[in-house]
Image (spheres, grey):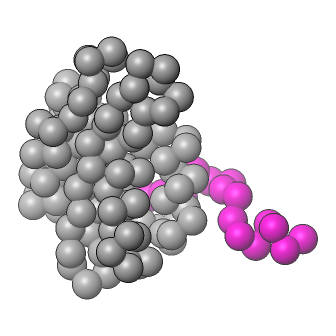
Amino acid sequence: MDELMEAAREAVEASYAPYSEYRVGAAIETADGTVYTGCNIENANYSNSLHAEEVAIGTAIREGHREFERLAVSSDKRDGVTPCGMCRQTLAEFCDEDLPIRTDGEDSAEYTLGELLPTTITPGHLDK
């Protein structure tokens, strides 16, 4: 996971965060080993801001990927940031609950998506 975390750290550098001054990068690995990165991109109204994880997975999906192996997330603070609830739900649309998610910094840890989002809404809920 070290190379994946390094990719997430590099993505932090591309972040556009003039309002929060909290820069985030993410790297997601596809089933075939391709790595896609993303960074947070803020907007003055905040609600139109993009999160690093959604940029990374969105780019991978645009390129035709639908299966993912692992995710790494870093911030310029290296404070162990995890994906927010919205990003967790987006990840749950395409990833199994056992997707490993690694955080960065002194408080770094590894979680599974299922640990971070234990009762997710799935496409199966729409069939009921």
**Residue plotted at (32% across, 56% down):** 56
Q: Quadrant of residue 65?
A: bottom left
Q: Is residue 64 left or right of residue 89?
A: left
Task: Give residue 95's position: percent from left, percent from top.
Answer: 48, 69
Q: Is residue 34 above or below residue 55?
A: below
**Residue plotted at (27% across, 24% down):** 17
46 is within the stretch colored magenta: no
From this viewpoint, is residue 99 visible? yes
Task: Give residue 9's position: percent from left, percent from top.
Answer: 13, 43
Q: Is residue 82 above or below residue 32?
A: above
The magenta region covers 112-128
From this viewpoint, is residue 104 visible? no
Image label count: 0
Task: Give residue 82's position: percent from left, percent from top.
Answer: 38, 40
Q: Is residue 108 left or right of residue 48?
A: left
In the rendered view of the protein, which quadrant contains the C terminus? bottom right
Q: Is residue 77 left or right of residue 40?
A: left
Q: Camera-side residue: 106 or 120? A: 120
Q: Quadrant of residue 43?
A: top left
**Residue plotted at (21% across, 75% down):** 34
In the rendered view of the protein, which quadrant contains the N terminus? bottom left
**Residue plotted at (36% across, 28% down):** 42
Task: Give residue 44's position: percent from left, percent from top.
Answer: 41, 19
Q: Camera-side residue: 127 or 115? A: 127
For this orientation, the residue located farthest to the bottom is 32
